[in-house]
């Protein structure tokens, strides 16, 4: 069979949050991109994610925020229970005039992003197996598993923690944090009656929480220190049982009740990985007209809820830099695009490294280890002073996309 050969201006690898958001940003500045997704459809399985004010500013720049804000409530307060003592602390989640975080269904977010793209912008069942650079600044030849060959002027990796494009750039592999996380949705057909605050439960080596999504659904999670040498089960029912009978056995009854109502199709258990900040600071985040976005650039632990937020920021910033180059030159000029990508990397590298470090430190401080000193630091110092400083990273505006006049609009 003769191989199919395609020529594209920009190819994005991965149709997750980062990939779809990047495609929308480029579309809004007049550039069509082809998104390659290895799955046979949008990966809408999974639970939910919390989006802080910085993410909503990015979604507003992408023209998507208005589709989601009517569906979900702002979370203004977090109540933190020390499982050992029963003491409860309240922490405000409101950030200045920008409101607080909003937790959304992952499926709803992905579908809202995908709706913004033209038909045939996403090519499903398209797994890259090799990438070849024909020159320092491209073009790039991508060979897919099905035999298709695609050439492109610009290549953007949005392919997650195990990024194929990041490896091509030579970025160091993410490392294991030593912790794992379970996330899922709980469904209460008759209503759950849980108030709208975020509830969090802390114990030595464990941190759990529940966040109401609406009257009938609750997002719940558990992070814990991964037992050394222990193989993690992949059976959702067994994971649910382990959470109830082992990890959460001393938690307040409300948490176990939520886990019992778990929709097992949404449950995932995975090790938490991160790219070391210095590997990001000193590594190759771009080469010529190739770069990475989202988890492909900066995988981080979920302890500040900034993974998805940072991916949306990335998309807007990259779209702004490439869009300005495109508008100024009237087309994609390889050398000018490489300079635009360098500008994107310069703007994102240090912020992403700080997000990784802050997230890891937040998880370490909250999960902690045994000992009175660690408990005093967490309960007296961390939540009173440090945590407020850490969540201030949500006080960030990634900016707008350049305005596009009618003559430059994409077809």
Image (spheres, helix red, strand yellow):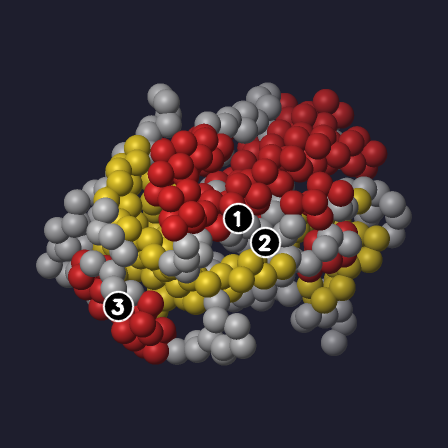
Q: Can residue 157 be seen in the rendering of this structure?
A: yes
Which of disc 2 and disc 3 is earlier in sequence? 3
* Residues at discs 1 and 2 in contact (Cβ within 8 Å): yes
Q: Residue furthest front?
A: 372
Q: Nearer the viewer, mark 3 or mark 2?
A: 3
Q: Secondary structure at mark 3?
A: loop
**Residue at the spot of label 1:** 360
Q: Residues under labels 1 and 3: Cα distance?
A: 26 Å
Of 6 and 399, nearer the camera is 399
Few, some or many C-alpha atoms within 10 Å of disc 3 (few <14, some 14-19, many ≥20)?
A: few
Q: Which mark is residue 179?
A: none
Which of disc 3 and disc 1 is earlier in sequence? 3
Q: Is residue 300 above or below residue 410?
A: below
**Residue at the spot of label 2:** 274
Please state the horizontal and vertical placement of residue 310, each as a whole percent of the image.
Answer: 53, 40
Q: Is residue 361 above or below residue 189?
A: above
Q: Residues under labels 3 and 2: Cα distance?
A: 29 Å
Q: Secondary structure at mark 1?
A: helix
Residue positioned 15% across, 55% down in the render: 192
């Amino acid at each position: 069979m003769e191989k199919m050969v395609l020529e594209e201006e920009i190819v994005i690898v991965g149709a997750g949050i980062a990939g779809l958001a990047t495609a929308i940003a480029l579309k809004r500045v007049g550039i069509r991109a082809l998104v390659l997704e290895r799955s046979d459809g949008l990966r809408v399985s999974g639970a939910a994610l919390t989006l802080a004010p910085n993410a909503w500013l990015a979604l507003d720049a992408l023209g998507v925020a208005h589709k989601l804000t009517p569906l979900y409530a702002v979370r203004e307060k977090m109540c933190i229970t020390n499982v050992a003592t029963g003491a409860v602390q309240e922490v405000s989640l409101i950030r200045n005039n920008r409101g607080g975080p909003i937790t959304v269904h992952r499926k709803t977010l992905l579908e809202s992003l995908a709706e913004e793209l033209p038909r045939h912008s996403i090519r499903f069942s398209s797994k890259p197996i090799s990438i070849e650079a024909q020159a320092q600044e491209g073009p790039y030849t991508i060979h897919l598993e099905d035999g298709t060959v695609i050439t492109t002027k610009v290549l953007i990796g949005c392919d997650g923690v195990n990024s194929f494009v990041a490896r091509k750039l030579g970025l160091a592999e993410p490392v294991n944090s030593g912790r794992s996380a379970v996330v899922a949705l709980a469904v209460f057909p008759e209503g759950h009656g849980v108030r709208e605050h975020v509830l969090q439960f802390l114990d030595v080596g464990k941190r759990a929480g529940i966040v109401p999504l609406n009257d009938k659904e609750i997002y719940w999670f558990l992070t814990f220190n991964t037992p050394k040498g222990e193989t993690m089960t992949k059976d959702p029912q067994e994971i649910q049982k382990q959470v109830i009978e082992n990890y959460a056995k001393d938690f307040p009854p409300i948490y176990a009740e939520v886990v019992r109502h778990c929709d097992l199709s949404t449950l995932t258990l995975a090790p938490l990985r991160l790219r070391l900040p210095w590997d990001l600071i000193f590594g190759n985040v771009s080469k010529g007209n190739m770069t990475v976005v989202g988890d492909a650039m900066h995988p981080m632990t979920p302890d500040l809820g900034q993974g998805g937020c940072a991916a949306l920021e990335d998309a807007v910033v990259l779209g702004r830099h490439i869009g300005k180059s495109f508008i100024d030159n009237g087309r994609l000029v390889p050398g000018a695009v490489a300079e635009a990508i360098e500008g994107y990397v310069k703007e994102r590298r240090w912020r992403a490294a700080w997000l990784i470090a802050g997230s890891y430190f937040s998880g370490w401080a909250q999960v902690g280890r045994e000992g009175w000193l660690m408990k005093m630091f967490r309960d007296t110092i961390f939540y009173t002073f440090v945590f407020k400083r850490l969540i201030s990273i949500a006080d960030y505006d990634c900016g707008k996309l350049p305005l596009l006049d009618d003559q430059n609009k994409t077809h």
